[in-house]
Each structure stands twice: as structure tokens, then as C-alpha cells.
């Protein structure tokens, strides 16, 4: 079995349409290699703007509908301790051993 590889994208109050279009483009490129089953994708949000956070949630739900079965995960961290580096550290503590 091929070990899983993770693509992690920390985000903070960024344009959800651009972010989710970008992760979809990366996912599609990986699928074209024929090795897409070896990859997981995580969007790690520290967004503090409620409108942007809601737009992220809606964009993720839409993406899930468009790429049925894709392993693209979204997590919003309500307290953004240490900013993006803290978000990556939290990811590594929680899920890093899987990769």
C-alpha cells in the first residue's frame, strides 16, 4: 500500500472562492496522475470574520457535492492561537501521525 500524503492549506479570512478553487485545482491535478487515492487534503481555517467563515463552510459543502468521494477535509479552529503556524502545529499533533 502506498503511504498517504497530505496537502495542508491554512487559511485566515481569505477569499473562500479563490481558496476552494485553488484546492480543487490541486486535487484535480493529483487525480490526473492516477495516484489520487494516496492523497488527503485539509483546509485549516482560523478565520475570525463570521461572514467569511460562513462562506468557507458553504464553499466546502459545494466542493463536496462536486467532487463526490474526495478526501478533502475542512476544519475551522475557533481560537487561532499562534496564527497559521499554530494551526499547522495543531494539525500535526492531531493528525500528523497518519502521514
Image (spheres, helix red, strand yellow):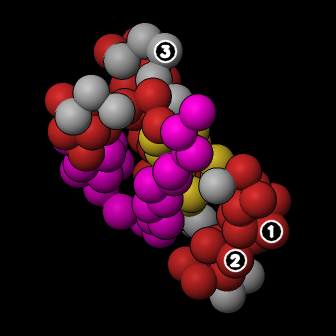
> Is label 3 in a helix, a strand or a loop?
loop
Other-residue count near label 1 (Cα within 10 Å), few / some / many at <14 / 14–19 / ≥20: few
* Residue position for label 2: 89
- Tell me if residue 54 can be seen: no
Asked whether disc 2 touches disc 1, contact meaning CB atoms under 8 Å apart, the reply is yes
Task: Name which quarter of the figure residue 35 lies in.
Answer: top left
Task: Name which quarter of the figure residue 13 lies in.
Answer: bottom left
Question: Of the numbered discs in the image, which one, if any, rests on residue 93?
Answer: 1
* Of pointers 2 and 3, the one earlier in the residue sequence: 3
Is 36 situated above or below 6?
above
* Of pointers 1 and 3, the one earlier in the residue sequence: 3
Region in magenta: 1-25
Q: Position of residue 9 (x, y in %)?
A: 44, 60
Other-residue count near label 3 (Cα within 10 Å), few / some / many at <14 / 14–19 / ≥20: few
Residue depicted at x 71% and y 68%: 92
Residue pushed farthest front?
1
Would residue 28 be found to the left or right of residue 61 on screen?
left
Would residue 86 be found to the left or right of residue 18 on screen?
right
Q: Marks 2 and 1, how far apart in space? A: 6 Å
Is 82 situated above or below 84?
below
Decide which of 58, 97 is in the foreground and name it.
Answer: 97
* Residue position for label 3: 69
Residue depicted at x 38% and y 25%: 63
Asked whether disc 1 touches disc 3, contact meaning CB atoms under 8 Å apart, the reply is no
Location of the N terminus (image quadrant): top right
Q: Position of residue 12 (x, y in %)?
A: 47, 68
Residue depicted at x 35% and y 63%: 14
Q: Marks 2 and 3, how far apart in space? A: 27 Å
Amino acid at each position: 500500500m502506498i503511504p498517504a500524503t497530505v496537502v495542508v492549506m491554512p487559511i485566515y479570512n481569505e477569499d473562500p472562492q479563490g481558496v476552494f478553487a485553488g484546492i480543487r485545482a490541486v486535487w484535480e491535478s493529483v487525480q490526473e496522475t492516477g495516484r489520487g487515492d494516496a492523497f488527503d487534503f485539509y483546509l485549516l481555517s482560523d478565520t475570525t470574520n463570521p461572514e467569511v467563515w460562513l462562506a468557507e463552510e458553504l464553499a466546502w459543502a459545494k466542493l463536496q457535492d462536486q467532487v463526490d468521494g474526495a478526501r478533502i477535509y475542512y476544519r475551522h479552529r475557533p481560537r487561532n492561537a499562534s496564527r497559521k503556524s499554530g494551526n499547522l502545529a495543531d494539525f500535526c499533533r492531531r493528525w500528523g501521525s497518519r502521514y
